[in-house]
Amino acid sequence: MVTQVLTEYVKVLQVLCPQVLKILKIMKLVVENVEVLTQMRTSFDKPDHMAALFKRLTSVDSVLKRMTIIGVILSFRSLAQEALRDVLSCHIPFLVSSVEDFKDHIPRETDMKVAMNVYELSSAAGLPCEIDPALVVALSSQKSENISPEEEYKIACLLMVFVAVSLPTLASNVMSQYSPAIEGHCNNIHCLAKAINQIAAALFTIHKGSIEDRLKEFLALASSSLLKIGQETDKTTTRNRESVYLLLDMIVQESPFLTMDLLESCFPYVLLRNAYHAVYKQSVSASA
């Protein structure tokens, strides 16, 4: 039984890892918009200027679609890891619990190479990790020799900016509606939460940046961008505004680096509470 599950899990990894490298195509889109994104990164407190800059962005839909696909792939792999963990826990519980203890007691000041070795061991046992070792290896192997490390780090930061300022466009999509029955959005954008967190963790591990600081910056930009659609009067562009608000909550819940207190400092909790109420009420009305 264990051998069969391990074999199937390896097959899943072989299929998914090349697909996860869609991130490299997104990086190219970031490079195409690098000048605008650099300005947006420091102008989130200037609504009019941000609106003008956003109009200059290209390939917004493409970035969100690719990120969603990556999120779906990572979510599928997470399910495979859960199955692996359940089977191994039944057959070799002592070994799995030992690996889990290793993972849960890594000091923050531990050398990253040592931590990554522990994460690789944990991931092989089906345990979720703060940093996905397979994603780190896959992205590290694709690093460009023509770009300096500083420039690569800047592009990684701007990728997070690109996704953050693009989230409000999802509200106009009729398929962005949140379904309480499946605890997700009809077009799978709830998978963005996993994609954003895991890609950020992998990229800023590779570039030796602060994962927590970059995710805080992302949260500030995303919150600011989403708060602006609360002032929109066009019903077409805001038809699923409440459903998109819930993405922020999902991103924070998915992240080991962000907290609800931090979210509330950027985005009023009352809006999230009202958003949950609205989507559940809409779901009841639709099923009546």
Image: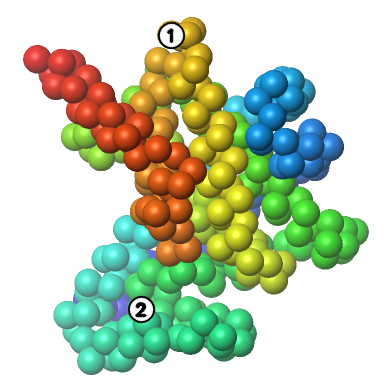
Residue at image location 36% in from the left, 78% down from the top: 125
Is 179 situated above or below 78?
Answer: above
- Relative to 124, 183 lies left or right: left
* Measured Cα–Cα span from mark 1 to mark 2: 48 Å
Residue 70, x across and y down, in percent: 52, 47
Q: Nearer the viewer, residue 178 or 144?
A: 178
Colour basis? rainbow
Q: Nearer the viewer, residue 196 or 27?
A: 196
- Label located before the other in sequence (1 or 2): 2
- For label 1, the crowd category at 10 Å Cα-Cα, with few meaning under 14, some 14 to 19 and many 20 or more, is few
**Tag 2 residue:** 125
Secondary element at image label 1: loop
Residue at image location 61% in from the left, 50% down from the top: 217
Is 177 situated above or below 63?
Answer: above
Is 279 situated above or below 143?
Answer: above
The amino acid marked with disc number 2 is Ala
> Which image quarter holds the C terminus?
top left
Check whether the beta carbons of the residues at disc 1 and disc 2 lie within 8 A of each other: no
Q: Nearer the viewer, residue 173 or 11?
A: 173
- Mark yes or no: residue 17 visible: no
Eye-nearest disc, 1 or 2:
1
- For label 2, the crowd category at 10 Å Cα-Cα, with few meaning under 14, some 14 to 19 and many 20 or more, is many
Is 63 situated above or below 97?
Answer: above
The amino acid marked with disc number 1 is Lys
Residue 113, x across and y down, in percent: 61, 85
- Relative to 28, 268 lies left or right: left
Q: Residue furthest left?
A: 288
- Relative to 41, 173 lies left or right: left
Numbered label attached to residue 235: 1
Residue 213, x across and y down, in percent: 60, 60
